[in-house]
Amino acid sequence: MIPFNRPPTTGEELRYIEEALGQGKLSGDGPFHERCHQWFEDQLGCSRAFLTPSCTHALELAALLIDVKPGDEIIMPSYTFVSTANAFVLRGARIVFVDIRPDTMNIDETLIEQAITEKTRAIVPVHYAGVGCDMDAIMELANRYELYVIEDAAQGMMARYRDRPLGTMGHLGAFSFHETKNYTSGGEGGLLIINDESFVKRAEIIREKGTNRSQFFRGMVDKYSWVGLGSSYLPSELQAAYLWGQLTRAEQIRENRLAIWNGYHKALRPLISTGVVDGPELPKATAHNAHMYFMKVRDLEQRSALIEHFKQSGVMAVFHYVPLHSTPFGLTVGDFCGEDRYTSRESERLLRLPIWYGMSSEAQEHVIQSLLAFFD
Ligand SMILES: *Cc1c(COP(=O)(O)O)cnc(C)c1O
């Protein structure tokens, strides 16, 4: 069976985990956290980077930071993972869903303005498949209406929009190191980056259970105490050590995934050019990270048939994201603004092909042959 994903490993992780075991500190903010935080701050050019237990937690921390209040409205696409919305619903916000663009499956930047009301607090663009949203347009709107922008860059590590890394253009950016993403911190993990310096101090407090322990460790106060709202947003040193084994090979992982992605794209070109399937489209301003290879078939029925065909030939291909506005809970906490022209229709015909770091060319060839046989 060819799985849909394999968690990335570079072979360096165990060495660093052993090093962490020997250092006499396993809780958060140890030496491996420091290495990872520094790496991200250099790589992304952000004010601060904080590892979190997941991207879900990074988004929750972001919602706390911008102080979302009951009744506030948050704009996002409906075609996204539940965590994008949950983080804000937890704070009492209502979600305003905006339609996506059919080419990238990202929020349609031209439809955001009509969704803005007096109650709007933030826009949460999701960089689907590591392909950047139109951040120029989104930041222009946000500045004009004085809204926060929190980038859900869960899939976007090592990808760019113009010359800027994804996650670094909004006030805050959230990334995932879950095992299905390009880089993992041992199965689960995430990162919040702070681009607007003014959030740094409160972020330190919130992630340390509402205490000023970070200041205490820096010798700025002589004892630490409870100074505000908080929770626990620190992963363990073992997770940071695993991640460090991937960050030292970050470029290698990206290049390997891009080669596999390009292999699919080349093999599918005849199907795409004859209109049998639609392939992924990459706007000029974007440099993606090959997080996923997706294609779109005719409709839901054809997709189900193709998934079944793949299964018969030992290939696991998956789809995801039932649009949130049509889910049982989504119906109660959000509203779709305007017409659902593409969200439902395009999500029903999208299929993701297996891709992982180190996927063999034999495995990929098997997937391609199975796919071509279906359309024959
Ligand atoms: C994976 C993902 C998340 C959640 O990441 P976790 O680290 O599993 O919490 C959130 N948003 C998007 C768009 C994702 O792809």
Image (spheres, rainbow, N blue to C red):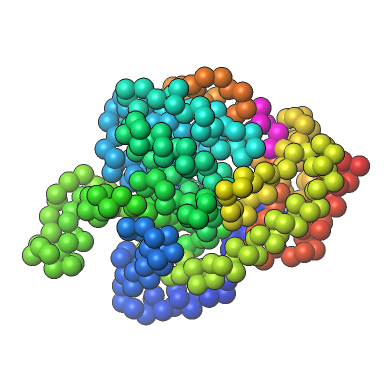
The correct choice, above or below, for 375 with respect to 358 in the image is above
**Image location of residue 259, percent across then percent down:** 70, 62
Residue 252, image x and y in percent?
Answer: 60, 69
Q: Residue at x 34, y 52 (%)?
A: 195
Residue 93 versus residue 193 in the image, above or below: above
Q: Residue at x 44, y 26 (%)?
A: 113
> In terms of depth relative to the viewer, which is nearer, 85 or 171?
171
Is 346 part of what is drawn in magenta?
Answer: yes
Q: Position of residue 146 (x, y in %)?
A: 31, 34
Q: Position of residue 233 (x, y in %)?
A: 33, 53
Determine if residue 206 is in view: no
Q: Quadrant of the N terminus?
A: bottom right
Q: Is residue 275 left or right of residue 316?
A: right
In this view, 184 is above or below 34: above
Q: Is residue 229 magenta?
A: no
Residue at figure coordinates x 65%, y 37% from the top left: 103
Q: Quadrant of residue 79?
A: top right
Left or right: where 6 falls relative to 41: right
Residue found 12% across the figure and 55% down from its top: 225
Question: Which segment did they paint magenta?
Answer: 345-350
Residue lying at the far left of the rendered structure: 222
Magenta part, dominant SS? helix
